[in-house]
Amino acid sequence: MARVTDGDSNLTAFALLVLVGCIALVGGWWRARRAVRPRVQAQLESAIAPLATGAGPAPTPPMRQDRAALGRYRVEREIGRGAMGAVLLARDLGSGRFVALKTVALGGEFDQHALAEVRQRFLREAETAGRLRHPDIVAVCEAGEDQGLVYMAMEYVQGHDLQRHTLQAGLLPVPVVLHLAARVADALAYAHRQGVVHRDIKPANVMIDLDADTVKVMDFGIARIADSSRTRTGVVLGTPSFMSPEQLAGQRVDGPSDLYSLGVMLFQLLCARLPHEASSMAALMSQIAHERAPDIRSLRPDLPEALADLVARVLEKRPELRPSDGHQLALDLRRIAASVEACAAPRVPPEAGVFVPVVKFSRDDPGHNSAA
């Protein structure tokens, strides 16, 4: 049996004292850092308050060295959060412009052996999305990796997504919904011609600013990354309701699949509910694969028959029965919108038309010529 000497005991006691001291120092640093964060956060929110009110970018403040940075972007604050990461408002240190950084913490979502492959796939998808140049598609500036995060830098878009307009109290007028959907369909038609499929069309991925007449489709290619996650069910759980039957079945996904998802979004924007709803994932997948969506007129009798027929066609189970492409769908939506607007326009009575009513003069009026 080994004998413990006084020297060994003294060494052990000294090591314990050092360990306790280190823990105390780290604890004090952490408490001080947490105390500073609210003040720094308040300064950041004050600096970018005009962005939230639509007043445009704030005057360029001096850059603080204590702000986090990703690549060449200085992070201002978090503006959103998704299943795989946060969306950050950041400033490009080169140009001074604001961008939105979509981050993905790959280490927490993927097995180690798949990490390198997924990283490359993310960067490749971002590069593909960056080639899309359309007024109704969010522009991707670049993608990179820093501090264990891969990120995609996109143009910063003011406004809000369509999610709030899927609730009964927030439904938009029918012509507005149709024109918005038509612009999304045109954007998809452009992307499909470039060989890019979105895979995750839903209200949360469409930003709008009605006052500025802005529509922006976001997140091209992100769904392909999420689809590879080891936590597939946890990551994709929020979007199966918008997936086409072929996408849920794991088959090849192309343009008609995106149009089906747009049809689900259109249904929800018009009726404040999804075409298929179930209490379990298995039941939902079965409905999407085998059951026809309800006729929208059974939920809203005020909607025109032509619109009900078009929505039913977009939600067909077989891809070949859907509209041929996004451009054709956009034309049909605009035609129906024009018809709805024409029916809603007030009718001008005949007497209020462009012709001036005839004024009859009396022969007895001495101020006018007479036939005498």
Image (cartoon, grey):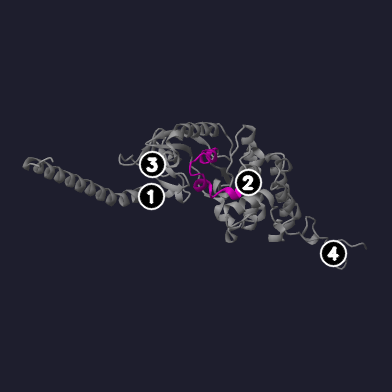
Magenta stretch: includes residue 171: no
Label 1 vs 2, first from the N-terminus: 1
User: For mark 4, what is the residue?
Assistant: 361
- Looking at the rendering, the stretch of residues picked out in magenta corresponds to 221-242
Give the Cα distance between marks 1 and 2.
36 Å
Q: Which of 113 and 59 is in front in this view?
A: 113
Dot in front, 1 or 3: 3
Q: Label 2: how many residues lie within 10 Å, few (<14), some (14-19) or many (20+)? A: many
Camera sees residue 300: no
User: For mark 1, what is the residue?
Assistant: 45
Label 1 vs 3, first from the N-terminus: 1
* Residue 114 sits above or below residue 233 on the image: above
Label 1 SS: helix
Dot in front, 3 or 2: 2
Label 2 vs 4, first from the N-terminus: 2
Label 2 SS: helix
Kind of residue at disc 3 = Val
Give the Cα distance between marks 4 and 1.
73 Å
Label 4 vs 1, first from the N-terminus: 1
Label 4 vs 3, first from the N-terminus: 3
User: For mark 2, what is the residue?
Assistant: 261
* Position of the C terminus by quadrant: bottom right
Residue drawn at (62%, 32%) of the image: 195
Kind of residue at disc 2 = Ser
- Residue 182, by quadrant, is top right
Residue drawn at (61%, 44%) of the image: 248
Dot in front, 2 or 4: 2
User: For mark 3, what is the residue?
Assistant: 75
Labels 3 & 2 near each other (Cβ < 8 A): no
